[in-house]
Image (cartoon, helix red, strand yellow):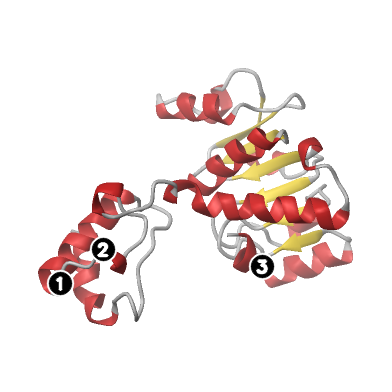
């Protein structure tokens, strides 16, 4: 009802040549499908008015991983720019939703080591690396992140101080304030969420010599 009501309120402002909708936190292919149905009822059947829909409705097969693929492309470009081996990177990811989970999978496929992952209810760390597919199955089965075998459970705040090459904030907006920025022990931050760094955090990281690839490029 919320999704359909929203579409009823904004449908007159939407269209392939005007503005389109895209999924974000708390939405997915099913919700985007409901919105498309409502748009078709109110205006016309036009699949291009929303992204993130199921393939049967005209969606792209790799839409779920698209944002993370952009993030990984930035990671590879950064490796070339700053002369480090992307297969040797140690990564900490804040958030394990669509962007964070796909980023973990794709970075691991490159050979990088995902040494830390956090969610709102906790975090895990392993110098040997975390298997994001196994973690995803564990969470899908109702397990808590701290119960995942093969990694050390931590408070989500404690993971922020873990040493790594790259920190990926992918948990939501405003999650990295000045205090968090001062704790990070990384060389590079790649913004996976929208505006995870506050403006003051950028200054802290710049003063500490930590490079930042912003959300407008990375995600």
98 on left or right of 155:
left
Residue placed at 66% from the left, 34% from the top? Answer: 108
Counting residues from the start of the chain, the first of labels 3 and 2 encountered is 2
Q: Position of residue 26 (x, y in %)?
A: 38, 52
Q: Nearer the viewer, residue 213 or 109?
A: 109
Q: Position of residue 49 (x, y in %)?
A: 29, 69
Q: Position of residue 66 (x, y in %)?
A: 50, 52
SS under mark 3: loop
- The quarter of the image holding the C terminus is bottom right
Figure check: 154 above or below 201:
above
Q: Nearer the viewer, residue 6 or 181?
A: 6
Give the distance between the C-alpha atoms of the residues marked 1 and 3, in whole angstroms.
41 Å
SS under mark 2: helix
119 on left or right of 6:
right
Q: Is residue 155 visible?
A: no
Question: In front: mark 1 or mark 3?
Answer: 1
Counting residues from the start of the chain, the first of labels 1 and 3 encountered is 1
Q: Are marks 3 and 2 in contact (CB under 8 Å)?
A: no
Return the mark for residue 47: 2
Residue placed at 42% from the left, 58% from the top? Answer: 24
Q: Position of residue 136 (x, y in %)?
A: 49, 30
Q: Are marks 1 and 3 in contact (CB under 8 Å)?
A: no
25 on left or right of 16:
right
Please tell me in which quadrant of the rendered image residue 43 appears: bottom left
Q: How many marks?
A: 3
Query: Which residue occupies the extreme top position in the image?
Result: 149
User: Dot 1 corresponds to which residue?
Assistant: 44
User: Dot 3 corresponds to which residue?
Assistant: 198
């Amino acid at each position: 009802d919320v999704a359909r009501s929203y579409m009823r309120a904004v449908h007159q402002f939407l269209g392939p040549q005007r503005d389109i909708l895209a999924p974000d936190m708390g939405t997915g292919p099913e919700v985007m499908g409901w919105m498309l149905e409502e748009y078709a009822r109110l205006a016309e059947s036009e699949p291009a008015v929303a992204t993130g829909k199921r393939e049967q409705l005209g969606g792209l097969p790799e839409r779920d991983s698209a944002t993370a693929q952009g993030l990984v492309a930035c990671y590879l470009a950064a490796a070339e720019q700053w002369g480090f081996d992307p297969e040797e990177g140690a990564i900490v990811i804040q958030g394990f939703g669509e962007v964070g989970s796909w980023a973990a999978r794709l970075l691991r496929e490159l050979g990088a080591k995902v040494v830390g992952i956090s969610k709102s209810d906790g975090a895990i760390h392993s110098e040997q690396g975390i298997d994001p597919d196994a973690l995803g199955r564990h969470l899908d089965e109702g397990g808590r992140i701290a119960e995942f075998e093969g990694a050390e459970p931590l408070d989500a705040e404690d993971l922020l101080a873990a040493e790594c090459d790259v920190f990926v904030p992918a948990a939501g907006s405003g999650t990295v304030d000045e205090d968090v920025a001062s704790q990070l022990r990384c060389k590079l931050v790649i913004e996976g969420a929208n505006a995870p760094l506050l403006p003051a955090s950028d200054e802290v990281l710049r003063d500490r010599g930590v490079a930042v690839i912003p959300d407008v490029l990375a995600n």
